[in-house]
Amino acid sequence: MDIRQFQQLIDEKYGKRDRQRGTAATFMWFIEEVGELATALAGEDDENKQEEFADVLAWLCTLANINDVDLEQACEKYISGDIQGYK
């Protein structure tokens, strides 16, 4: 499955509810999942780490969907060699 397919799957399954929730509330859910990932990374439970990475990706897709961003297209800069500078 590629990024676009996963993003579409998330939209099909949760899109209506996600749009009703809106960006601000969805961003808070995303941040909560990032916090859970941070906790998992500090531990030794590899299964939990995998689960939290998946949750963060799913919520990122949700944010992208409700803001009309195609993540696969947005990531093109990383494979096209069109990255300017370093952060």
Image: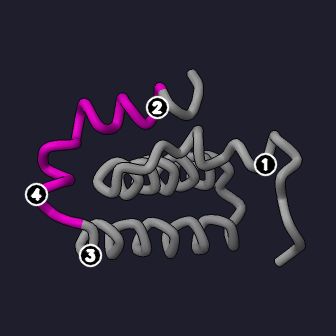
Separation of marks 3 and 2 at Cα, in angstroms? 22 Å
- Disc 1 secondary structure class: helix
Q: Are marks 3 and 4 in contact (CB under 8 Å)?
A: no
Q: Which mark is residue 78?
A: 1
Is 80 situated left or right of 76 in this image? Answer: right
- Check residue 19 for magenta coloring: yes
Q: Do the residues labelled 1 and 2 touch (CB within 8 Å)?
A: no
Residue at 43% in and 37% down = 7
Q: Identify the residue under disc 4.
A: 20
Query: Considering depth in this image, is 67 or 15 the residue closer to the camera?
Result: 67
Separation of marks 2 and 4 at Cα, in angstroms? 21 Å
Residue type at mark 2: give it: Phe
Q: Residue 6 carries which label?
A: 2
Q: Identify the residue under disc 3.
A: 24
**Among numbered discs 1 and 2, the one appearing first in the sequence:** 2
Residue at 88% in and 47% down = 81
Separation of marks 3 and 1 at Cα, in angstroms? 27 Å
Residue type at mark 4: give it: Gln
